Amino acid sequence: MTDFSKPHRGVAYFGLWATETADEYGRRAAVTILATAAELCTDEDMREDREVRAALDYLAQQGHDKRATLFRKALDVPHPTRGGRRQQRPSTRSRGH
């Protein structure tokens, strides 16, 4: 599982403060990925996106499992004008993270 808080742990300059706030920054990073997915999901199929799955897994592990489950269910809602079909998203395309 991806640990979104890892980059924020052990930052020498900020010491203890960075370690204590790492989980919050990890949560923010995961939510940012999901916000981007929410914007793209009307045109692209985000259900199998590795970053989206990792962000949902991370949030579930951090105690937000109900919200992660609801987001997964929302991704399964069919596209209203395409008969439930969405464009497959290439896994190599970056969203600037």
Image (cartoon, helix red, strand yellow):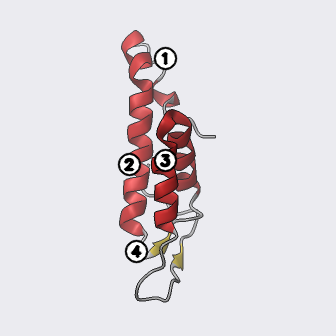
Q: For this rendering, which residue is in front, 2 or 11?
A: 2
Q: Is residue 52 above or below residue 6?
A: below
Type of amino acid under label 1: Gly
* Residue 28 placement, left or right of 78: left
Mark 2 or mark 3, whichever is nearer to me: 3
CA distance separating discs 1 and 3: 30 Å
Q: CA distance from mark 1 to mark 2?
A: 22 Å
* Sequence order check, earlier mark of 1 and 2: 1
Q: Position of residue 63 (x, y in %)?
A: 50, 35
Q: Nearer the viewer, mark 4 or mark 3?
A: 3
**To which residue does mark 2 refer?**
32
Position of 95 with respect to 72 (left or right) is left
Q: Quadrant of the N terminus?
A: top right
Helix, strand or loop at mark 2: helix
Nearer to us: label 1 or label 3:
3
Q: Are marks 2 and 3 in contact (CB under 8 Å)?
A: no
- Tell me how far mark 4 sits from mark 3, CA to CA: 23 Å
Furthest-front residue in this view = 66
Residue that carries the numbered disc 3 in the rendered image: 66
Query: Hey, what amino acid is under mark 3?
Result: Lys
The residue singled out by tag 4 in the image is 42
The crowding category of the residue bearing disc 1, from other C-alpha atoms within 10 Å (few below 14, some 14 to 19, many at least 20), is some
Q: At which x and y percent is residue 25?
A: 39, 32
Q: Earlier in the sequence, mark 4 or mark 3?
A: 4
**What residue did someone put label 1 on?**
10
Measured from the top left, where is residue 62 in percent x and y? 51, 34
Q: Amino acid at mark 2?
A: Thr
User: Mark 2 or 3 closer to N-term?
Assistant: 2
**Which amino acid, mark 4?**
Thr
The reply to whether the C-beta atoms of the residues labelled 1 and 2 are less than 8 Å apart is no
Q: Please report whichever mark, 4 or 2, sits nearer to the chain's N-terminal start.
A: 2
Check whether the beta carbons of the residues at disc 1 and disc 4 lie within 8 A of each other: no
